[in-house]
């Protein structure tokens, strides 16, 4: 089986670009707090979702709707509406994280295929089995904290499809359970869908340097001319033992393009490209590169693909993340 | 021992890697002297720590139970290794009351009474209902819960509701060990450096502001969550259990102070004075409950519904 290429779309234009560049599947979200990339100017209204589905289906591709945040108490309606609207738009599956939302979707729309979001942080056989057995999920998006050996072991045991991250940022924390951004800003990624929201980001000149800040907290410092990375709490510099370091994660991008054969051998069904917040040009470039790599792999020419993605990689340095030993 | 109508006090699991003798002495004193109703016991952060003190566990549990405490066995918050999953399965099958901190446990304890720990996201009625149907008898709400969330969930709950009211706030768990990274080591070669910091390792901002505390693979707040002024409101919302998270301070005295406030024996203001003497330089935080950034300190009552 060829690896399924699952690509991000933050806008209808990005969806069409992803399909045109060779995505097998595109994932997107509604324009509200129900998805984990709730940033200004991004995402789809219900009509745009339906149009996106029609476009993708015309070329035999699929669309997934991410409804992967956690409803606030007393306010489940936006999440229930999102599920209903996704079903009405004819999406091929919904990507869910909250136990209550999973229950709603399984009860109200039993025939709508359900995937488990990385935001559910299901990192082991038993967690995945819980969601599989209770809510009949057909695919799990695995957290970015597992080695290839661990991925292979899970694939053998869980009896459902797996989707793994192939390109994008490295998430060192257990996703869906990280409260660092709300600790600093008061806005919750889990229920409002925005980690390090732009409304709380600022840059301040400090002599020959620029400070990047989130809320009232300084997360990094750059000399003029150096690319100033976006101030996300887990990508900041901190001081421990009097020494400054990237304590949680270096400014690097996950890029698994040269270990696709290993992921395929591990039995992975689908590769996820991260970046619904990124531009259409990014989508075209990354999707096109992975399309070529997967096609080459299918022809038995894995070594023939050159890795040319450094220019779009975050921080422009690349890593295999947790897939290879030594990361943890 | 306590007036149930005023709410019960619990001691959360010890999150830090204390030396075996320190841990034994700590729990002996808790068993004999602390005015808490339940004690959560077990390693939550890192399974590599477990061999150091596992021979002590049985005696500690016996002593806690002899001291009249309900003992709840806490699981890891993030399991990825086969032996970690197997240990959770064995614990669940042993029939003890388990605090599930990873959804993995639910696959084993469903249908039997268990506690949902604060590392499983319960932010709404839908997830609360599913978990109660699965046999949860007590749900510890996540640290990020606002008063609005607590009010909705605690008031409608058919089971007990617990909330953290004292101690560093757990902000994230990871596969990677930041304590090891801070010593330029990795999780596999960690040399158990987390044991050097009984109250965690300070991680400050680059401009010298105190912000976070590292505890192995876990990230905590730099400050202690202190909910004293809010206790009566929380009890009124239907919160039944109030959790104290062990810190490297006199936890027996902390428990005494909270107990006195719950029992209306002293005012929150009097209690604040007593507690400040125990917590020394560590700042206090309560922002999450007040709908603010979690690091904030809000000097006001909770807004009425």
Image (cartoon, rainbow, N blue to C red):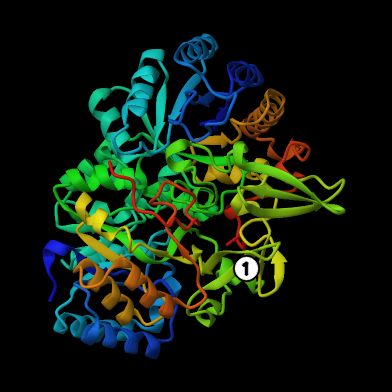
Quadrant of res B72: bottom left
Please say if A40 is above or below A122. Answer: above
Which quadrant holds the C terminus of chain B? Answer: top left
Which residue is at a point 18% across and 63% down the rendered structure image? B7
Return the residue nearer the eye: B266 or A141: B266
Front residue of B230 and B171:
B230
Quadrant assignment, res B40 = bottom left
Residue A315: x and y in percent read 74, 46
x, y (%) of residue A67? Answer: 42, 30
Residue B161 in view in this figure: no
Task: Give the crowd class for mark 1: few <14, some 14-19, many >=20 residues within 10 Å.
Answer: many
At horizontal 16% and vertical 83% (from top left) the residue drawn is B67
Percent coordinates x, y for residue A260 in the rendering: 61, 41
Disc 1 marks which residue? Answer: B181
Q: Residue at x 68, y 60 (%)?
A: A246
Q: Is residue A184 left or right of residue B42?
A: right
């Amino acid at each position: 089986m060829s690896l399924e290429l699952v690509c991000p779309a933050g806008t209808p234009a990005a969806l069409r670009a992803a399909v045109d560049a060779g995505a097998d599947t595109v994932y997107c979200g509604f324009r509200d707090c129900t998805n984990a990339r709730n940033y200004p100017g991004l995402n789809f209204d219900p009509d745009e979702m339906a149009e996106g589905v029609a476009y993708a289906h015309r070329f035999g591709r699929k669309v997934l709707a991410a409804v992967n945040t956690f409803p606030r108490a007393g306010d489940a309606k936006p999440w229930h509406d999102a599920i209903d609207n996704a079903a009405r738009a004819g999406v091929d599956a919904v990507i869910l994280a909250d136990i209550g939302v999973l229950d709603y979707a399984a009860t109200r729309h039993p025939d709508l295929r359900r995937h488990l979001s990385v935001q559910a942080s299901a990192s082991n056989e038993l967690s995945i089995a819980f969601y599989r057995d209770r809510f009949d999920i057909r695919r799990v998006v695995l957290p970015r904290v597992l080695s290839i050996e661990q991925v292979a072991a899970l694939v053998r045991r869980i009896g459902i499809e797996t989707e793994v991250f192939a390109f994008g940022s490295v998430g060192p924390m257990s996703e869906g359970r990280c409260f660092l951004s709300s600790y600093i800003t008061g806005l919750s990624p889990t229920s409002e869908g925005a980690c390090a929201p732009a409304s709380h980001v600022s840059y301040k000149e400090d002599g020959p340097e620029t400070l990047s800040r989130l809320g009232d907290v300084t997360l990094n410092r750059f000399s003029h001319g150096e690319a100033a990375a976006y101030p996300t709490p887990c990508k900041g510099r901190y001081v421990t033992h009097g020494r400054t370091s990237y304590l949680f994660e270096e400014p690097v991008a996950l890029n698994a393009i040269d270990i696709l054969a290993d992921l395929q051998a591990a039995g992975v069904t689908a590769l996820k490209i991260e970046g619904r917040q990124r531009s259409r040009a990014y989508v075209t470039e990354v999707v096109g590169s992975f399309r070529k790599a997967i096609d080459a792999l299918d022809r038995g020419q894995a070594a023939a693909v050159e890795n040319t993605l450094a220019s779009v990689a975050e921080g422009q340095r690349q890593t295999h993340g947790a897939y290879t030993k030594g990361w943890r | 021992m306590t007036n149930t109508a005023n709410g019960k006090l619990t001691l959360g699991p010890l999150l830090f890697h204390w030396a075996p003798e320190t841990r034994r002495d700590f729990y002996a004193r808790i068993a004999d002297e602390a005015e808490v109703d339940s004690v959560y016991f077990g390693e939550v952060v890192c399974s590599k720590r477990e061999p150091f003190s596992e021979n002590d566990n049985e005696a500690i549990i016996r002593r806690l139970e002899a001291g009249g405490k309900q003992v709840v066995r806490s699981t890891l918050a993030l399991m990825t290794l086969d032996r970690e999953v197997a240990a959770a399965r064995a614990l669940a099958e042993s029939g003890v009351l388990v605090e599930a901190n990873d959804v993995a446990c639910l696959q084993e304890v469903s249908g039997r009474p268990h506690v949902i720990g604060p590392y499983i996201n319960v932010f709404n009625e839908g997830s609360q209902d599913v978990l109660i149907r699965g046999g949860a008898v007590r749900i510890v709400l996540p640290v990020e819960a606002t008063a609005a969330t607590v009010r909705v969930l605690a008031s409608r709950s058919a089971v007990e509701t617990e909330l953290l009211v004292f101690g560093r706030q757990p902000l994230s768990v990871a596969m990677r060990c930041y304590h090891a990274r801070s010593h330029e080591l990795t999780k596999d070669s960690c040399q158990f450096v987390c044991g050097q910091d009984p109250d965690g390792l300070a991680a400050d901002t680059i401009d010298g502001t105190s912000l976070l505390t590292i505890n192995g693979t876990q990230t905590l707040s730099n400050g202690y969550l202190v909910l004293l002024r809010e206790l009566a409101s929380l009890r009124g919302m239907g919160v039944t259990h109030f959790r104290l998270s062990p810190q490297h301070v006199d936890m027996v005295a902390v428990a005494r102070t909270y107990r006195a406030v719950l029992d209306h024996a002293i005012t929150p203001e009097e209690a604040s004075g007593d507690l400040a003497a125990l917590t020394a330089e560590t700042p206090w935080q309560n922002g999450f409950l007040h709908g603010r950034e979690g690091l904030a300190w809000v000097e006001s009552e909770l807004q009425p519904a």
